[in-house]
Amino acid sequence: MTTAAAPPRIPEAIHRRRWAILGTLVLALLVVVLDNSILNVAMKTIASPAPTGIGASQSDLEWSINSYTLVFAGLLFTSGLLGDRFGRKRALLAGMAVFGLASLLSALASTPGELIGYRALMGVGGALAMPATLAIIMNVFERSEQPKAIGIWAGAVGLAIAIGPITGGLLIEHFWWGSVFLINVPIVVVALIAMVLLVPESKDPNPGRLDPVGVLLSIVGLVALIYGIIKGGELADFTAPEAWAPTLGGLLALIAFVLFERRTAHPALDVGWFRNKVFSASVVVVGVVFFALMGVSFFGVFYIQSVRGYSALQAGLLMLPLAVAQLVFAPRARLVVDRFGIRATCATGMLLIAVGFLGYLLLDATTPIWVLIVLGLLMGTGMAHVMPPVTVAIMGSLPREKAGAGSAVNNTFRQVGGSLGVAVLGAVLSTVYRDGMSDQLAHLPTAELRDKAGESLEATLAVAARLGEQGKALVGPANDAFIDAMHVVAGLSAGVTAAGALLAWFLLPGRLPAGAPGGPAGPGGATVPGQGDAARKPAAADA
């Protein structure tokens, strides 16, 4: 009597259409990431007075981004739990429907307040959809194919970054500002139809009892923490009570969450996951990468458009190298991991990003534009060799039935890191810029003009335009002050990323454990207990 090889754990009907399912999930990911990359290009137009824009102030522009981030990050973990409990396909469908409706409402917004509110609603949809995409990938691909699938998933972010600014530039040049949101609606409709037809339902078969206290503490903690971070960045002063009070409250709520989860019999989050060095190091690396990148991406648009004078469409084209490098290399990062291991791959990727940031120190108002293109390629290549491997490590260290919660933790650290980057590095940028302009602003006729012009480069240029001939003397010093501030922020980002490289080198394993995605197979090619959940029931032995 011989024993048949263990069957795959994915049903054959799902396995056959796995790549079509991945394409559908990528479409969902594209529309969420596409929206944010389009919005970055459209910010300058939205700030213009009606009818060109809606007269959004610098604070309005920040909160049109922050309202989405606040809600998105605050609900990510809860949404992952809901998907695991009630069905990831249901969560994905609900998220996309809400996102599409909120996009339509955002396109029709007539005031900055309306836009901020509808962007918050988009955050609800994004929070429901994002964890579900990665969780479904973990449940439709065999472990041997998961690194490739996750690489494509991560590369889709690069694709969205590439087509977002270009699409936004085209829309802004030919239509009104609301078209940058309206473009989401047909994509959402197509994605919803494909999801209904292709994506299988999956959920945790034994979710246990609900943990309402843990869920509530996680929401309160994350929302308060990120609000405090955002407020500190907006004020450029983290010692202000409006900043430190909610930040402290959020941290206390999260500490209470961890303590409660350790003691309850049915925790929403198994905090024991963080005792796994691979899991904890990987989520911290994700946070560090997005801390640096999100802060710098915020000033990149203003450097290209305001300092260098390029149009929105041209700004989108100049962001293309960063995105193309991610799209090309992310799906192939598994091959580098196979040869050199996850530690060396991620640490080297982080160092490439750090070198890219240092390259920003070379940029001034007349630097040849090919330098920016090379820096984009370099940083995109680095990103492509960090995000897929650490995402594989995070998801592979958890049971498959907890994929939604694991995906949500991954995305939560990404959002918290990104929010910190925008707030902290944005505050540094604002402070250094204001200090650099202090002598020039002192000659303005009124205190109101001095305060307004000191807010940002865009505000200074707007005041200069109002003053006519007198204001022309502000343009050159404003550009110089902004470039100096950009250099300071780029240097800080390089330092943070280099620290992340050291973290990856010392905390990540040389190789992933046997049976984990991207690691060597277990005995007989089987998954190793504890690295994933049980396979399908074994086939009957052959006589």
Image (cartoon, rainbow, N blue to C red):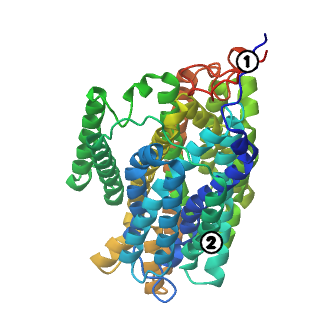
Q: Residues within 10 Å of mark 2 (few under 14, many from 20)?
A: many
Residue for badge 2: 168
Residue for badge 1: 541
Measuring 24% from the left and 50% from the top, which residue is drawn there?
246
Q: Examine the rendering and report whether any part of residue 202 can be seen.
A: yes
The mark closer to the camera, 2 or 1, is 1
> Could you tell me if the residues under marks 2 and 1 are in contact, i.e. CB atoms within 8 Å?
no
Q: Earlier in the sequence, mark 2 or mark 1?
A: 2
Image quadrant containing the N terminus: top right
Residue 333 sits above or below residue 179 on the image? above
The disc label shown at residue 99, or none: none
Element on which disc 1 rests: loop
Say left or right for 33 vs 74. right
Q: CA distance from mark 2 to mark 1?
A: 59 Å
From this viewpoint, which residue is outermost toward the top?
A: 1
Residue 179 sits above or below residue 331 on the image? below
Q: In the rendered structure, which amino acid carries the disc numbered 2?
A: Gly
Element on which disc 2 rests: helix
Residue 38 sits above or below residue 173 on the image? above
Q: Examine the rendering and report whether any part of residue 443 can be seen.
A: no
Within the image, what quadrant is residue 518 found in? top right
Say left or right for 379 vs 70. right
